[in-house]
């Protein structure tokens, strides 16, 4: 039996690793702005010990508009030390951690009292889950944070069962690392830790001297990680800026209705005050996460709203999910039920407190609830109903669902959304670096896309793909003769001779540019024009 379990664990791990690393640098179609930011800062840390702004080994990395958590950047530095400065090195750490999360979920489900069959099923389910696959392939910190969260939960339960000090300290460290890795965990993890202590209070028994000592070490470890975090929170803008920039309060749909203290009468002050309006708005956002269409049909937003898409889960999961809910209500395992209920209610809490409706990334912490529920369904069907054929039927249908997801992910998703992944900036950066000696100046516009209201961070793509020396950049924050500037074509065509302008067609606009000056054109995956390269040296006046 042990050999079967080990084989099963290895099988789901390698399956998960395969689907997370296959053509890793091609899908998603381009490194996002966050990825090149992580990549170049990791490269800078590796080469100089400082980030792009000159801060030595920072605990929060200053970015455009906010600060990035540190954990993934340091992990990427290790990856670059092994694989070099390239796209694979940026994406591989999170892809690997995503695959390792599969094994940790299996362990969690098993420790909660479900069978090995159900536990290994949860691993298979996570291995092919679109929700987890996508974010594992694109260097999202939420995947790393979820891994630490799952691992912390596993080690916490092991501590409850075995009462070893190392488990107490390790659990606290893992939970703390989760908080340091992604923003959503800053709300969720403290609630989870409190719930775990409550759910397992009888087994923990803090009246016992040995357990009390180990719980104290749990607290001390947490404080060691928390003190620098609290310093960032209260004495720097690192934490507050992110919270303010994504807060639900900033949503225009809410801001338009707030009185901001200007009440017309007492009735309005009591029954329609700002606190009530904010609570009502938040409650609506929170309840929207319990929409089955989000879970099973449209949650991942790989296609436009008018087309059929992919949900957080597969459609084939729906019957098993309902069985799992029923099994949990009937279960005599109170700890399993309590933890599942907590995760069910708290999973979307962090996401609901921020801007944007039904945000799949910020709700990623919800995944364990679905894994536990589906595993409970498997246990119910195999033990109570004693059925085996449904398992085979599920696997076949799940593979059909997976093929459908794969087709959407590698064909439709790039076609409809390549511009939102800053597709084209890689090609621009490589061309600019190779041809910088052929022009007096090269100007790259920060605006892109089929609409004029989208801006990017082209300087990060230039730094990353040109592999610009971080030590030189810290001394002189410029990139040779390559500059970031939107074209003002009426004047620029006369002012800058023998220069190259790279911008979206509407940024010039293109009808004002002589055809002989356009030396190169780029397109998005849907064949819409993305960038044109205009050489002022070819203009004839």
Image (cartoon, grey):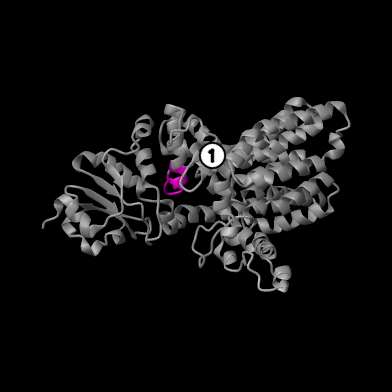
Front one among 416 and 532: 532
Q: Which residue appears farthest toward the right when viewing the image? A: 207
Q: Residue at x 83, y 30 (%)?
A: 212
- Asked if residue 161 is positioned above or below residue 190 in the image, the reply reads above
Name the residue carrying label 1: 94
Q: Residue at x 43, y 32 (%)?
A: 44
Q: Magenta stretch containing residue 28, yes or no?
A: yes
Q: Residues within 10 Å of mark 1 (few under 14, many from 20)?
A: many
> Where does the magenta region start and end?
26-36
Q: Magenta stretch containing residue 167, yes or no?
A: no
Front one among 163 and 217: 217
| Residue 312 rendering spot, x and y as whole percentages | 60, 55
Q: Which residue appears farthest toward the left when viewing the image? A: 541
Judge from the rendering whether residue 83 lies leftward or rightward of residue 115; answer left or right: left
Judge from the rendering whether residue 2 lies leftward or rightward of residue 419; answer left or right: right
The answer to whether residue 387 is seen in the rendering is no
Quarter of the picture holding the N terminus: top right
Front one among 126 and 194: 194
Q: Residue at x 44, y 47 (%)?
A: 33
Quarter of the picture holding the C terminus: bottom left
Picture quadrant of residue 13: top right
* Dominant secondary structure of the residues highlighted in magenta in the image: loop
- Asked if residue 503 is positioned above or below residue 53 in the image, the reply reads below
| Residue 516 rendering spot, x and y as whole percentages | 16, 56
Picture quadrant of residue 237: top right
Judge from the rendering whether residue 437 lies leftward or rightward of residue 505; answer left or right: left
The answer to whether residue 375 is seen in the rendering is yes
What secondary structure is marked by label 1? helix
């Amino acid at each position: 039996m042990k050999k079967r379990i080990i084989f099963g664990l290895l099988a789901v791990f390698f399956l998960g690793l395969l689907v997370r690393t296959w053509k890793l640098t091609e899908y998603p179609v381009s490194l996002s702005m966050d990825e090149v930011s992580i990549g170049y800062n990791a490269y800078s840390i590796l080469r100089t010990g400082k980030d792009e702004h000159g801060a030595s080994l920072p605990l929060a990395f200053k970015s455009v508009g906010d600060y990035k958590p540190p954990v993934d950047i340091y992990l990427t530095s290790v990856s670059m030390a092994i694989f070099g400065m390239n796209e694979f090195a940026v994406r591989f750490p999170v892809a690997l951690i995503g695959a390792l999360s599969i094994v940790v979920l299996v362990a969690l489900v098993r420790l909660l009292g479900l069978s090995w069959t159900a536990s290994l099923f949860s691993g298979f389910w996570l291995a092919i889950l679109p929700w987890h696959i996508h974010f594992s392939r694109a260097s999202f910190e939420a995947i790393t944070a979820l891994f630490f969260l799952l691992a912390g939960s596993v080690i916490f339960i092991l501590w409850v069962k075995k009462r070893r000090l190392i488990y107490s300290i390790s659990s606290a460290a893992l939970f703390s690392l989760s908080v340091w890795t992604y923003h959503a965990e800053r709300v969720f993890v403290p609630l989870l830790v409190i719930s775990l202590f409550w759910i397992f209070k009888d087994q923990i028994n803090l009246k016992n001297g040995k357990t009390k000592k180990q719980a104290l070490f749990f607290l001390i470890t947490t404080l060691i990680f928390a003190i620098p975090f609290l310093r960032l929170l209260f004495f720097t803008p690192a934490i507050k800026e992110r919270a303010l920039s994504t807060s639900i309060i900033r949503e225009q749909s809410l801001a338009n209705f707030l009185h901001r203290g200007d009440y017309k009468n007492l009735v309005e002050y009591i029954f329609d005050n700002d606190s009530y309006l904010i609570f009502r708005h938040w409650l609506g956002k929170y309840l929207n996460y319990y929409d089955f269409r989000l879970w099973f049909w449209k949650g991942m937003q790989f296609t436009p709203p008018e087309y059929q898409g992919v949900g957080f889960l597969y459609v084939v999961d729906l019957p098993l999910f309902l069985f799992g809910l029923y099994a949990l209500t009937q279960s005599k395992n109170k700890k399993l039920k309590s933890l599942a209920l907590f995760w069910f209610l708290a999973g979307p809490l962090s996401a609901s407190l921020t801007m944007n409706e039904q945000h799949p990334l910020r709700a990623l912490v919800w995944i364990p609830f679905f894994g536990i529920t589906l595993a409970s369904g498997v246990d119910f069907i195999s033990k109570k109903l004693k059925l085996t054929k449904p398992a085979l039927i599920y696997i076949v249908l799940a593979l059909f669902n997976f093929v459908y997801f794969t087709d959407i992910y590698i064909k439709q998703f790039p076609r409809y959304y390549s511009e939102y992944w800053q597709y084209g900036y890689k090609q621009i950066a490589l061309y600019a670096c190779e041809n910088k000696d052929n022009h007096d100046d090269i100007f790259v516009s920060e605006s892109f896309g089929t609409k004029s209201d989208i801006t990017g961070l082209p300087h990060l793509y230039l730094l990353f793909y040109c592999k610009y020396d971080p030590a030189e950049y810290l001394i002189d924050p410029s990139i040779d003769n390559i500059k970031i500037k939107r074209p003002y074509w009426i004047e620029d065509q006369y002012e800058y001779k023998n220069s190259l302008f790279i911008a979206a067609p509407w940024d010039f606009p293109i009808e004002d540019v002589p055809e002989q000056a356009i030396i190169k054109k780029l397109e998005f995956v849907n064949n819409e024009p993305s960038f044109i390269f205009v050489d002022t040296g070819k203009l004839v006046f």
